[in-house]
């Protein structure tokens, strides 16, 4: 979709639209303290390369697909693309496609006419229309129902929308940026995502690295989160002990930057004094191996039940052949027979099906 220089007045914008105070970024040594919702902080090589790619692709009008795990800052990347584009002074509109059910999602995205359904007392301008001239960001695009995918595809191809209940098409000029933590090519194979839409939205693919792959950035991120945010002024300005920082660096952060920010906010509020020490860190971060080793333990399931389930699963795998199942389990055939008698399952497997070869 081409850029627009139209100065025509936009309709009243929904509250979810961000006006053009967009992100800035710089290596950590040059980073100024600004609201973290608009900040990408980095000094790692992998993020340096990502920023260079954003610089290259942003001036184009190509659709962008941002891939990455939850909490890696995909929306920040989308905002960065918008800020570096010719559309920077137009709206940046974001919608989480997984947060609304199908009927509400269509109305939120494309708008609706008065009386088009129960409760539609007034006309509503959809987010796609409100983003006219700017950037539309579809987060969790892999969650879109197939019916909405078809309408989104038509919107991309024709550059026009129909409000729910509307009969007239509305021309809309936007740049589309999508994000997902799913493998969309596999969703295409499974039939849950349209192949034609997949190729329309992934003209440019940008990958947001998980925090475990950019650990060099953790000290700068920690210091940033400890000195900014929604906390009271009295809680700001805390520093962190070097040993505690090393523990934060070594931790794998499965929730990525979102988890790190949450941890810093808790430390900022709950730790005493101006220095955060090792003992202030949560046990799950100080001793992650303990958490991992017991993560799947369910005290409500006795060992007997787990053993029975595993042995019967082995028998199913080998087509009921007790000899092969015993070999696969690493036990004797006599032990297997005794277990089946114990479970009351011996008669069921008294005659096995045709042996299954490895």
Image (cartoon, rainbow, N blue to C red):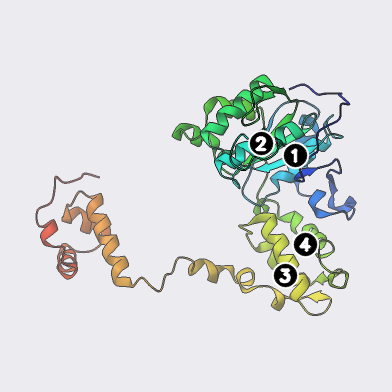
- Which of label 3 and label 2 is nearer to you? 2
Which residue is denoted by mark 2 in the rendering?
A: 109
User: Foreground: 289 or 69?
Assistant: 69
Residue drawn at (74%, 66%) of the image: 264
Which numbered disc flags the more N-terminal residue, 3 or 4? Answer: 4
Residue 88 locus on image (x, y percent): 85, 34
- The reply to whether discs 1 and 4 touch (Cβ–Cβ < 8 Å) is no
Residue 328 locus on image (x, y percent): 26, 56
Which residue is denoted by mark 4 in the rendering?
A: 222
Would you call the spot at circle 4 few (<14 residues within 10 Å), some (14-19), or many (20 or more)? many
Residue 211 locus on image (x, y percent): 68, 53
Which numbered disc flags the more N-terminal residue, 4 or 2? Answer: 2
- Which of label 1 and label 4 is nearer to you? 1
Above or below: residue 148 compared with residue 314: above
Q: What distance separates the C-alpha of mark 1 from that of mark 3?
A: 30 Å
Q: What distance separates the C-alpha of mark 3 from that of mark 4?
A: 12 Å
Residue 3 locus on image (x, y percent): 80, 24
Q: Quadrant of residue 240?
A: bottom right
Q: What distance separates the C-alpha of mark 1 from that of mark 4?
A: 29 Å
**Label placed on residue 266:** 3
In this image, 35 relative to 250: left or right? right
Would you call the spot at circle 1 few (<14 residues within 10 Å), some (14-19), or many (20 or more)? many
Q: What distance separates the C-alpha of mark 1 from that of mark 2?
A: 10 Å
Would you call the spot at circle 2 few (<14 residues within 10 Å), some (14-19), or many (20 or more)? many
Which numbered disc flags the more N-terminal residue, 1 or 3? Answer: 1
**Label placed on residue 93:** 1
| Kind of element beneath mark 1 | strand
Q: What distance separates the C-alpha of mark 4 from that of mark 2?
A: 36 Å
Residue drawn at (78%, 38%) of the image: 92
Which numbered disc flags the more N-terminal residue, 1 or 4? Answer: 1
Which numbered disc flags the more N-terminal residue, 1 or 2? Answer: 1
| Kind of element beneath mark 4 | helix
């Amino acid at each position: 979709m081409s850029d627009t220089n139209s100065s025509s007045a936009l309709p009243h914008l929904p509250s979810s639209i961000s006006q053009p105070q967009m992100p800035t970024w710089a290596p950590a040594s040059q980073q100024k303290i600004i609201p973290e919702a608009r900040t990408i902080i980095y000094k790692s090589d992998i993020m340096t390369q990502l920023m260079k790619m954003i610089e290259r692709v942003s001036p184009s009008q190509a659709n962008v697909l941002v891939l990455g795990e939850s909490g890696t800052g995909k929306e920040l990347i989308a905002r960065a693309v918008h800020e570096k584009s010719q559309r920077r002074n137009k709206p940046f509109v974001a919608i989480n496609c997984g947060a609304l059910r199908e009927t509400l999602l269509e109305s939120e995205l494309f708008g609706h006419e008065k009386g088009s359904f129960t409760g539609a007392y007034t006309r509503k301008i959809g987010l796609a229309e409100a983003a006219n001239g700017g950037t539309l960001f579809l987060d969790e695009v892999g969650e879109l129902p197939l019916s909405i995918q078809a309408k989104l595809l038509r919107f991309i191809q024709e550059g026009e929308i129909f409000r729910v209940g509307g009969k007239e098409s509305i021309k809309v000029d936007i740049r589309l940026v999508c994000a997902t933590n799913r493998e969309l090519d596999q969703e295409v194979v499974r039939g849950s995502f349209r192949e034609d839409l997949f190729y329309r939205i992934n003209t440019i693919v940008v990958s947001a690295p998980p925090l475990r792959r950019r650990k060099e950035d953790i000290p700068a991120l920690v210091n940033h989160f400890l000195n900014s945010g929604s906390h009271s002024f009295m809680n700001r300005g805390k520093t962190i002990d070097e040993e505690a920082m090393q523990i934060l660096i070594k931790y794998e952060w499965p929730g990525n930057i979102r988890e790190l920010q949450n941890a810093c906010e808790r430390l900022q509020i709950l730790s005493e004094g101006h220095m955060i020490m090792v003992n202030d860190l949560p046990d799950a971060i100080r001793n992650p191996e303990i958490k991992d080793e017991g993560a799947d333990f369910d005290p409500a399931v006795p060992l007997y039940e787990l053993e029975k389930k595993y042995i019967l699963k082995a028998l199913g795998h080998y087509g009921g052949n007790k000899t092969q199942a015993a070999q696969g389990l690493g036990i004797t055939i006599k032990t297997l027979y005794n277990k089946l008698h114990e479970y009351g399952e011996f008669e069921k497997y008294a005659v096995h099906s045709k042996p299954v070869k490895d």
